[in-house]
C-alpha cells in the first residue's frame, strides 16, 4: 500500500532541491533569466560596446531586437547592433542589417551614419589582418568590396553634404582609390611577367584615365613605357615617356 506520508516528504525534497539549485546558479545564468527592463539591458549593451566587448553587446542587442521590434529603442538598438557587428569583424552580418535598415527607414535622422557605416564595413571586408599587420600588400584580392566602399562614401558626400562624417569619408575615398589603382598595377605587372604586353598597357591606361589622382599613375606610365618597348612601338613609347617625365617632375 502506498505510503502517502513518504510521498509528501519526497515531494518536499524535490522542491527544496530546486530552490537550492537556483541559489547555486552562476551569475551569468541568473542574468539571462532576470526580468530587467529593456532600457537597463540596452544600457548594459552600450557599456559593453564602450568596453570593446562587442560580442557580448551583440548578444543583448539581438535579444532586444527580437523581443521588442517596435519599442521606443528599436531603431537605436538596430543601429548599435550594426556598429557592434562592424567592430567585431562580423561583416557578413553587418551588411544585411544595414541594407534592411536603410530600406525600411530611408528618412531616419541617422541615415547618414548608416551609409557611412556601410562604407566602413565594405572598406574593411576581406582585408587579411595578418598581411596588414606585417605590411604586406593584399591589393591583388577581389576589389568588389573596395569599389562598394568608394560608392558608399561618394553617396554619403552627395546625399548628405552637411553630415559630420563627410570629411572622413573624403579621406577614406582617397585611400580606397589608391587601393583600387594599386590592384590594377599588380594585374599589369602580372601580365608583363607573362609577356601579355597589350593587356598590361590596357590596365595601365585605365589607371591613368580613371585613377589619375592616385599614387599609381607613375608606376602605370613606367609599365607602359616598358610594354611599348617590348612591343617595338617606338612612337608610343616616346609619348608615354614624355607623360611619365611630366608626372615624375611634379
Image: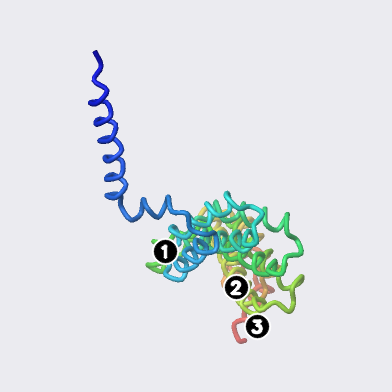
* Residue 36, percent from left and from top: 48, 58
Residue found at x 73% / y 55%: 104
Placement of the C terminus among the 4 image quadrants: bottom right
**Is the residue 192 above or below the residue 157 in the image?**
above
Mark 2–mark 1 Cα distance, whole angstroms, equals 26 Å
**Disc sitting over residue 172 in the figure:** 2
Regarding residue 71, the answer to whether it shows in the image is yes
**Is the residue 238 above or below the residue 203 in the image?**
below
Residue found at x 60% / y 61%: 146
Q: Which class describes the residues within 10 Å of circle 2: few (<14), some (14-19), or many (20+)?
A: some
Q: Earlier in the sequence, mark 2 or mark 3?
A: 2
| SS category of the residue bearing label 2 | helix
Q: Contact (CB < 8 A) between labels 2 and 3?
A: no
Nearest the camera: 47 or 180? Answer: 47
Q: State the image quarter where residue 173 is shown.
A: bottom right
Q: Earlier in the sequence, mark 2 or mark 1?
A: 1
* Residue 93, percent from left and from top: 55, 52
**Residue receiving disc 3:** 246
Q: Nearer the viewer, mark 2 or mark 1?
A: 1
**Residue receiving disc 1:** 53
Regarding residue 230, the answer to whether it shows in the image is no
Q: Nearer the viewer, mark 2 or mark 3?
A: 2
Nearest the camera: 152 or 224? Answer: 152
Residue found at x 73% / y 59%: 105
Residue found at x 50% / y 64%: 40
* Residue 194, percent from left and from top: 52, 53
| SS category of the residue bearing label 3 | helix
Q: Which class describes the residues within 10 Å of circle 3: few (<14), some (14-19), or many (20+)?
A: few
Q: Earlier in the sequence, mark 3 or mark 1?
A: 1
Q: Which class describes the residues within 10 Å of circle 1: few (<14), some (14-19), or many (20+)?
A: some
Left or right side of 177 for 87: left
Amino acid at each position: 500500500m502506498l505510503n502517502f506520508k513518504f510521498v509528501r516528504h519526497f515531494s518536499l525534497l524535490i522542491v527544496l532541491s530546486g530552490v537550492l539549485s537556483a541559489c547555486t546558479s552562476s551569475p551569468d545564468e541568473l542574468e539571462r533569466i532576470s526580468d530587467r527592463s529593456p532600457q537597463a539591458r540596452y544600457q548594459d549593451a552600450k557599456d559593453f560596446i564602450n568596453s570593446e566587448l562587442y560580442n557580448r553587446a551583440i548578444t543583448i542587442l539581438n535579444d532586444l531586437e527580437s523581443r521588442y521590434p517596435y519599442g521606443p529603442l528599436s531603431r537605436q538598438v538596430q543601429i548599435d547592433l550594426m556598429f557592434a557587428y562592424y567592430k567585431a569583424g562580423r561583416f557578413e552580418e553587418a551588411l544585411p542589417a544595414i541594407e534592411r535598415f536603410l530600406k525600411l527607414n530611408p528618412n531616419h535622422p541617422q541615415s547618414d551614419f548608416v551609409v557611412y557605416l556601410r562604407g566602413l564595413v565594405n572598406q574593411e571586408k576581406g582585408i587579411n589582418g595578418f598581411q596588414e599587420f606585417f605590411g604586406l600588400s593584399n591589393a591583388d584580392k577581389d576589389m568588389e568590396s573596395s569599389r562598394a566602399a568608394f560608392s558608399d562614401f561618394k553617396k554619403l558626400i552627395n546625399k548628405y553634404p552637411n553630415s559630420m562624417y563627410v570629411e572622413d569619408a573624403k579621406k577614406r575615398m582617397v585611400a580606397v582609390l589608391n587601393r583600387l589603382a594599386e590592384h590594377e598595377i599588380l594585374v599589369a605587372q602580372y601580365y608583363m611577367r607573362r609577356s601579355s604586353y597589350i593587356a598590361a598597357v590596357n590596365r595601365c591606361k585605365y589607371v591613368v584615365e580613371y585613377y589619375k589622382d592616385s599614387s599609381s599613375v607613375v608606376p602605370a606610365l613606367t609599365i607602359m613605357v616598358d610594354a611599348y618597348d617590348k612591343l617595338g612601338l617606338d612612337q608610343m613609347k616616346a609619348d608615354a615617356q614624355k607623360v611619365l617625365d611630366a608626372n615624375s617632375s611634379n
